Image: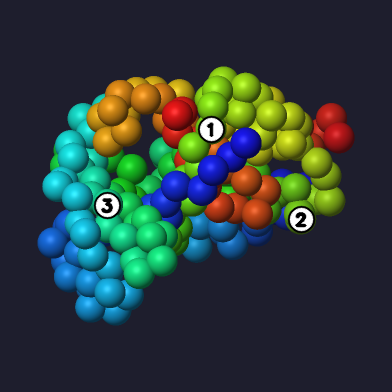
Amino acid sequence: MMEFNHIGIFVKSLEIGRQILTETLQIKNWSEPIVDSIQGVTVQFGYDSTDICYELVAPNAKVNPVDNVLKQGKNILNHVAYKVDNIDQAIKKLQDLNNILISGPVKAKAFNDKKIAFLFTKLRFIIELIEK
Amino acid sequence: MREKLLNTFRETFPEANFEYKDFESLEINSVSEWDSMGNLNLLMNVESTFDIRLTSEELSETKSIKEILNILNKK
Protein backbone atom coordinates (compact mmCIF):
# COMPACT_ATOMS: atom_id res chain seq x y z
CA MET A 1 0.00 0.00 0.00
CA MET A 2 1.22 3.50 -0.81
CA GLU A 3 0.93 5.81 2.17
CA PHE A 4 1.06 9.58 1.56
CA ASN A 5 4.07 11.19 3.22
CA HIS A 6 4.81 14.71 1.96
CA ILE A 7 4.74 17.37 -0.76
CA GLY A 8 8.18 18.48 -1.92
CA ILE A 9 8.88 22.08 -2.89
CA PHE A 10 12.14 23.33 -4.40
CA VAL A 11 13.44 26.58 -2.93
CA LYS A 12 16.50 28.77 -3.34
CA SER A 13 17.07 28.79 0.41
CA LEU A 14 15.43 27.03 3.34
CA GLU A 15 15.16 30.29 5.24
CA ILE A 16 13.10 31.99 2.52
CA GLY A 17 10.96 28.90 1.95
CA ARG A 18 10.32 28.45 5.64
CA GLN A 19 9.34 32.08 6.08
CA ILE A 20 6.91 32.08 3.15
CA LEU A 21 5.24 28.77 4.02
CA THR A 22 4.95 29.76 7.66
CA GLU A 23 3.25 33.02 6.69
CA THR A 24 1.02 31.78 3.87
CA LEU A 25 0.02 28.26 4.98
CA GLN A 26 0.79 28.46 8.70
CA ILE A 27 3.26 25.61 8.36
CA LYS A 28 4.88 24.88 11.71
CA ASN A 29 6.85 22.32 13.72
CA TRP A 30 9.79 22.64 11.35
CA SER A 31 12.38 19.89 11.62
CA GLU A 32 16.09 20.63 11.72
CA PRO A 33 17.67 20.96 8.25
CA ILE A 34 19.04 17.63 7.00
CA VAL A 35 21.92 17.46 4.52
CA ASP A 36 21.60 14.85 1.76
CA SER A 37 25.01 14.75 0.09
CA ILE A 38 23.91 12.08 -2.39
CA GLN A 39 21.26 14.41 -3.84
CA GLY A 40 23.27 17.61 -3.27
CA VAL A 41 20.48 19.19 -1.25
CA THR A 42 19.46 20.19 2.25
CA VAL A 43 15.86 19.43 3.24
CA GLN A 44 13.55 20.52 6.02
CA PHE A 45 10.08 19.28 6.95
CA GLY A 46 7.13 21.28 8.27
CA TYR A 47 3.47 20.50 8.99
CA ASP A 48 0.15 22.25 8.44
CA SER A 49 -2.78 22.20 10.89
CA THR A 50 -4.03 18.89 9.42
CA ASP A 51 -0.57 17.28 9.64
CA ILE A 52 0.07 17.43 5.91
CA CYS A 53 3.85 17.45 5.61
CA TYR A 54 5.77 19.83 3.34
CA GLU A 55 9.41 19.22 2.45
CA LEU A 56 11.56 22.18 1.47
CA VAL A 57 14.47 21.19 -0.78
CA ALA A 58 17.35 23.65 -1.22
CA PRO A 59 20.63 23.23 -3.10
CA ASN A 60 23.81 22.65 -1.12
CA ALA A 61 26.24 21.46 -3.80
CA LYS A 62 27.31 22.55 -7.26
CA VAL A 63 25.53 19.58 -8.82
CA ASN A 64 21.97 19.44 -7.53
CA PRO A 65 18.46 18.97 -8.92
CA VAL A 66 17.16 22.34 -7.71
CA ASP A 67 19.02 25.07 -9.60
CA ASN A 68 17.76 24.18 -13.07
CA VAL A 69 14.18 23.79 -11.84
CA LEU A 70 14.25 27.25 -10.26
CA LYS A 71 15.89 28.75 -13.34
CA GLN A 72 13.22 27.30 -15.63
CA GLY A 73 10.38 28.10 -13.23
CA LYS A 74 8.83 24.65 -13.80
CA ASN A 75 8.16 21.78 -11.37
CA ILE A 76 8.81 24.00 -8.34
CA LEU A 77 5.93 22.27 -6.57
CA ASN A 78 8.12 19.32 -7.29
CA HIS A 79 6.84 15.99 -6.05
CA VAL A 80 4.40 14.04 -3.92
CA ALA A 81 5.97 11.39 -1.74
CA TYR A 82 4.56 8.06 -0.62
CA LYS A 83 5.92 5.47 1.78
CA VAL A 84 5.90 1.90 0.55
CA ASP A 85 6.71 -1.44 2.16
CA ASN A 86 9.03 -2.67 -0.59
CA ILE A 87 10.52 -0.01 -2.85
CA ASP A 88 11.71 -2.39 -5.57
CA GLN A 89 8.25 -3.90 -5.93
CA ALA A 90 6.62 -0.46 -5.90
CA ILE A 91 9.01 0.82 -8.58
CA LYS A 92 8.30 -2.21 -10.76
CA LYS A 93 4.55 -1.75 -10.37
CA LEU A 94 4.73 1.94 -11.35
CA GLN A 95 7.07 1.18 -14.26
CA ASP A 96 4.60 -1.42 -15.51
CA LEU A 97 2.06 1.42 -15.55
CA ASN A 98 4.39 3.41 -17.85
CA ASN A 99 5.85 5.68 -15.22
CA ILE A 100 9.55 6.39 -15.75
CA LEU A 101 12.21 5.84 -13.10
CA ILE A 102 14.30 9.02 -13.09
CA SER A 103 16.40 8.54 -9.96
CA GLY A 104 17.23 5.88 -7.41
CA PRO A 105 16.69 3.80 -5.48
CA VAL A 106 19.33 5.29 -3.18
CA LYS A 107 19.63 5.76 0.56
CA ALA A 108 18.43 9.10 1.98
CA LYS A 109 19.64 10.59 5.22
CA ALA A 110 16.35 12.45 5.68
CA PHE A 111 14.60 9.10 6.05
CA ASN A 112 17.11 7.31 8.31
CA ASP A 113 19.02 5.92 5.35
CA LYS A 114 15.94 4.18 3.96
CA LYS A 115 15.87 4.00 0.16
CA ILE A 116 14.10 6.59 -1.98
CA ALA A 117 13.34 6.75 -5.71
CA PHE A 118 11.73 9.26 -8.06
CA LEU A 119 9.41 8.43 -10.95
CA PHE A 120 8.00 10.70 -13.65
CA THR A 121 4.34 10.10 -14.45
CA LYS A 122 2.60 10.50 -17.79
CA LEU A 123 0.79 13.48 -16.24
CA ARG A 124 4.26 15.08 -15.96
CA PHE A 125 4.60 15.24 -12.22
CA ILE A 126 7.02 13.38 -9.98
CA ILE A 127 6.27 10.71 -7.40
CA GLU A 128 8.86 10.01 -4.73
CA LEU A 129 8.83 6.60 -3.11
CA ILE A 130 10.25 6.11 0.37
CA GLU A 131 10.82 2.63 1.73
CA LYS A 132 9.32 2.13 5.19
CA MET B 1 9.36 14.72 -40.18
CA ARG B 2 12.56 16.61 -39.37
CA GLU B 3 10.76 19.96 -39.55
CA LYS B 4 7.90 18.72 -37.41
CA LEU B 5 10.39 17.46 -34.83
CA LEU B 6 12.28 20.75 -34.99
CA ASN B 7 9.04 22.63 -34.23
CA THR B 8 8.30 20.33 -31.31
CA PHE B 9 11.84 20.86 -30.02
CA ARG B 10 11.51 24.65 -30.27
CA GLU B 11 8.15 24.58 -28.51
CA THR B 12 9.63 22.45 -25.72
CA PHE B 13 12.81 24.50 -25.37
CA PRO B 14 11.93 28.01 -26.60
CA GLU B 15 15.17 29.50 -25.32
CA ALA B 16 17.44 26.87 -26.88
CA ASN B 17 20.18 28.49 -28.92
CA PHE B 18 21.60 26.38 -31.76
CA GLU B 19 22.35 26.48 -35.46
CA TYR B 20 19.65 25.00 -37.71
CA LYS B 21 22.26 22.83 -39.47
CA ASP B 22 23.32 21.35 -36.13
CA PHE B 23 19.84 20.22 -35.08
CA GLU B 24 20.43 16.53 -35.76
CA SER B 25 23.59 16.48 -33.67
CA LEU B 26 21.87 17.84 -30.55
CA GLU B 27 21.61 15.62 -27.49
CA ILE B 28 20.66 15.87 -23.85
CA ASN B 29 22.52 18.69 -22.03
CA SER B 30 23.67 20.25 -25.32
CA VAL B 31 21.25 23.13 -24.65
CA SER B 32 20.68 24.42 -21.15
CA GLU B 33 16.98 23.51 -20.80
CA TRP B 34 17.48 19.97 -22.08
CA ASP B 35 18.21 18.20 -18.81
CA SER B 36 16.78 14.84 -17.68
CA MET B 37 13.37 16.35 -16.90
CA GLY B 38 13.42 18.38 -20.10
CA ASN B 39 14.17 15.18 -21.97
CA LEU B 40 11.03 13.50 -20.64
CA ASN B 41 8.97 16.58 -21.50
CA LEU B 42 10.42 16.56 -25.03
CA LEU B 43 9.67 12.86 -25.52
CA MET B 44 6.10 13.26 -24.26
CA ASN B 45 5.62 16.20 -26.63
CA VAL B 46 6.96 13.97 -29.43
CA GLU B 47 4.37 11.34 -28.49
CA SER B 48 1.63 13.93 -28.66
CA THR B 49 2.79 15.62 -31.87
CA PHE B 50 3.37 12.42 -33.82
CA ASP B 51 0.51 10.50 -32.17
CA ILE B 52 2.74 7.62 -31.12
CA ARG B 53 3.39 5.79 -27.85
CA LEU B 54 6.96 5.32 -26.69
CA THR B 55 7.83 2.32 -24.56
CA SER B 56 9.21 2.77 -21.05
CA GLU B 57 12.60 1.68 -22.40
CA GLU B 58 12.45 4.28 -25.18
CA LEU B 59 11.46 6.99 -22.69
CA SER B 60 14.36 6.02 -20.44
CA GLU B 61 17.08 5.61 -23.05
CA THR B 62 16.35 8.08 -25.85
CA LYS B 63 18.54 11.13 -25.36
CA SER B 64 19.38 12.64 -28.74
CA ILE B 65 17.69 13.99 -31.85
CA LYS B 66 19.22 11.20 -33.92
CA GLU B 67 17.70 8.59 -31.62
CA ILE B 68 14.30 10.30 -31.75
CA LEU B 69 14.43 10.38 -35.54
CA ASN B 70 15.38 6.68 -35.60
CA ILE B 71 12.35 5.84 -33.46
CA LEU B 72 10.03 7.98 -35.58
CA ASN B 73 11.30 6.25 -38.71
CA LYS B 74 10.44 2.85 -37.21
CA LYS B 75 6.96 3.73 -35.90
Check disc 3 and give the amino acid type: Phe
Q: Look at mark 2 in the image and give the residue it sits on.
A: B49
Element on which disc 2 rests: helix
Q: Position of residue A87 (x, y in %)?
A: 53, 25
Q: Residues within 10 Å of mark 2 (few under 14, many from 20)?
A: few
Chain name for mark 2: B
Which numbered mark, 1 or 2, is in the foreground of this view? 1
What's the CA distance linking mark 1 and mark 2? 35 Å
Which numbered mark, 2 or 3, is in the foreground of this view? 3
Residue A62's place in the image compared with A131, above or below, is below
Q: Look at mark 1 in the image and give the residue it sits on.
A: A84
Residue B50's place in the image compared with A98, above or below, is below
Q: What is the basis of the colouring in this image? A: rainbow
Q: Look at mark 3 in the image and give the residue it sits on.
A: A45
Chain name for mark 3: A
Asked if residue A92 lies left or right of residue B50, the reply is left
Q: Position of residue A22 (x, y in %)?
A: 23, 72
